[in-house]
Amino acid sequence: MNIPPPRPSPDTPTRRDVTMARLLIVSLLVLCACSSLRGQADSMARKGLLVEAAAIYDDLSRQNPNDGELVLVRDNLRLRALTRLLSDARRARVEGRDEDAEDSLLRFLNHRAEWNTKLDGGLESSLREEVAGTRRHLQKLVGAPAGKGHALTAEQALLRKQPLLAHPELSRVARDMEWLVLQSGKASCLRLRDTSTEDSPHWRELVFRYCGHWREYAPRPASAPELFGPPSWSGTVEGLDAAQQARLEARLTQAFESSAWFSPGGPARPEFKLGGRFVTERDSQAVALTAPWTESVPYTDHEDRTETIEEPYEAEEEYTDSDGKTKTRTVTKYTTHTHTYSVPVTRYRDVPRTFEYHALRLSQAHHLAVASAATLDARRSPFVLAMQDQLSESGHEHDVTFEKGKVRPSQPSFTPAETWLDAKVEALAASFSQQLATYWQESYCSTPSLTLDEAARCARAGAAVPAQVARVLSDILGADATQVPILFASP
């Protein structure tokens, strides 16, 4: 016999009702979140934070692609933000604050490109005025030193403006400024070639690099006696295999050949004595570990309860019968009183516990000590390079699981020896480069009175030149004297 399922009463919610209710709750939460963010964005817009407000509306429009109003508000905020930025640029330009004007113009162009915003006629006109104002400013900032033959100074000013000039709206300005700088560099190269002398190898090297910087020819002089060819290495670092030793020597050789001490035609090869030790130590030890956890322990307590009791009693009461006579009768009444009693109850308390388990404590330590020395300046003590470093790591290995104590299987991961060694070799090469530059400056930049060739020799370090060097070089190079180290940034 098939018994049909009971039909739900009108008050019993169906599965469809529950689903619809959940969807309604989710929709209300989304609507509340959206309203809250819109309120935040509108508040930011009123405070003038238009770019930030537009970003919030952009997020909202992505989350609600069918809400066209969000897109309209976002686009309006973007246009207002662009108008504000361009207005700030125009105001700063009028007040003579060209750098501030170009900062605002750069932000305007960055946001316009990011948003792909189409400008109206008024903004297009203001943009053209700002481009013209930028051109006038760069004529002073870049064109003025270029016209004086200070091409390196002009180039550095132009490089500082590259983020702005990279925008297509200023491409013609960028090309014109680059042409001015290049022509200035070429003209200065021709002038400097006439000042070269046979007894000034360092000055002629500077001119060779200066002309090469502007794609012009100048003869390269023979190597000066202070310079060296590729270095040679003697000795080994204990613990390195042949490939690791070769990588170390190659990286240090590369650093030396990028220094002031190197010339491809150097008359001598410096011999660097190399020594040291590389070792990786590993250890394993059984250990007992503990993990704290909390256990909920039951216990019996007593609590008082109160109950109300109604007790019956008989009483006489008067009443009037149908004939109007007063009579008495016995009736049952009730009196109420409370009764307090104690009952046992089960409660729980948190008791701190410790979970004990066994694991292997694994440890690893990399140690590297490297020292190298060579005679680079016979007037001084040998050049010495030294580095010592180590990396110690440890962890526990086990396969124990105890969720209450947050204990899960563990397998420590250590830095591979090859990876750590490569990083240390790079650090050693960087230190080598820095110390070579310092050693060169100590050897050839400390003389109070310098000739032109000695000043050019000091500049080979590729670092900021001392004041006395800048004074000597400025007699010929002018403002470019402080920019000369750029020419020696690479071999």
Image: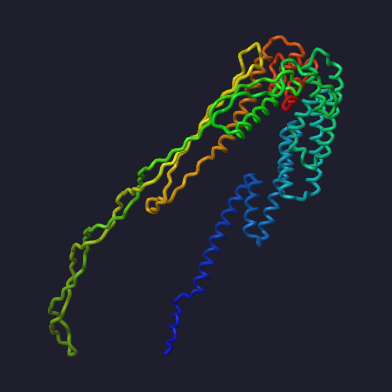
Which quadrant is the C terminus positioned in?
Answer: top right
Q: Left of 56 or right of it: where is 21?
A: left
Q: Left of 196 or right of it: where is 384?
A: left
**Residue 179: x percent and y percent?**
85, 32
In this view, the residue in front, 44 or 380, is 380
Residue projecting furthest to the top? 449
- The residue under the point 81% across, 19% down is 221
**Residue 274: x percent and y percent?**
59, 24
**Residue 150: x percent and y percent?**
80, 23
The image quadrant of residue 469 is top right
Residue 345 higher or lower than 94, as above or below = below
The image quadrant of residue 181 is top right
Which quadrant is the N terminus positioned in?
Answer: bottom left
Q: Left of 469 or right of it: where is 297?
A: left
In this view, the residue in front, 316 or 240, is 240
The image quadrant of residue 471 is top right
Q: How many labels does the image show?
A: 0
